[in-house]
Amino acid sequence: MRSRGTALSAASRLKGKYTVNPVTSCWEWNRSRSSQGRYPTIGLPGSGKPEYAYRIAWSEANGPIPIKPCPDGSWRWEIHHVCFNKLCVNPKHLKLVTNKEHTAAHNARRAAMRLAKAA
């Protein structure tokens, strides 16, 4: 995937901007983050606005994120961090899911955490 106005691929722009966690295998982003400081961002030349780095990483490994309607009626496709590490940009830890699937995964994790706290 090439950005407009540059010969650098998005993958090459990600390189060197994360460190590999030897325990979790997460590629933990160590550069700019979203305005809330929660998600990794990267500026792409010619776009004028930052893009989420994990979306770029997933797209480089798997192709573009679909714009077609979701089969379950969700309003959009999302990238889910299977490792639940918001700073991870490892494509092996990222999964394309529908909005409903993403919400269900996070709700299940919150419920499991509540049960673990109660025990």
Image (cartoon, rainbow, N blue to C red):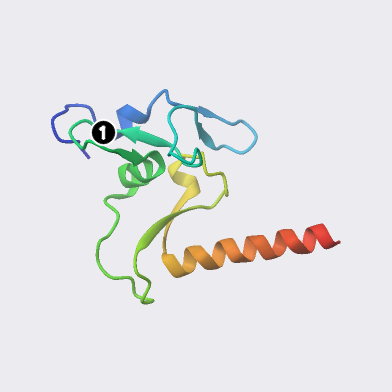
Judged left or right of residue 85, residue 101 is left
Q: Quadrant of the N terminus?
A: top left
Q: Residue at x 57, y 61 (%)?
A: 106
In percent of width and height, residue 17 lies at 43, 26
In percent of width and height, residue 73 lies at 36, 76
Judged left or right of residue 4, residue 77 is right
Q: Residue at x 39, y 58 (%)?
A: 78
Seen as rendered, the residue at the extreme left is: 5
Judged left or right of residue 69, residue 28 is right
Seen as rendered, the residue at the extreme top is: 16
Label 1 secondary element: loop
Seen as rendered, the residue at the extreme front is: 35
Of residues 89 and 63, the one nearer the viewer is 89
Q: Residue at x 51, y 65 (%)?
A: 103
Which quarter of the figure has residue 71? bottom left
Q: Quadrant of the C terminus?
A: bottom right
Q: Residue at x 49, y 63 (%)?
A: 102
- Residue placed under numbered mark 1 in the picture: 44
Considering only vertical position in the picture, is 39 above or below 12?
below
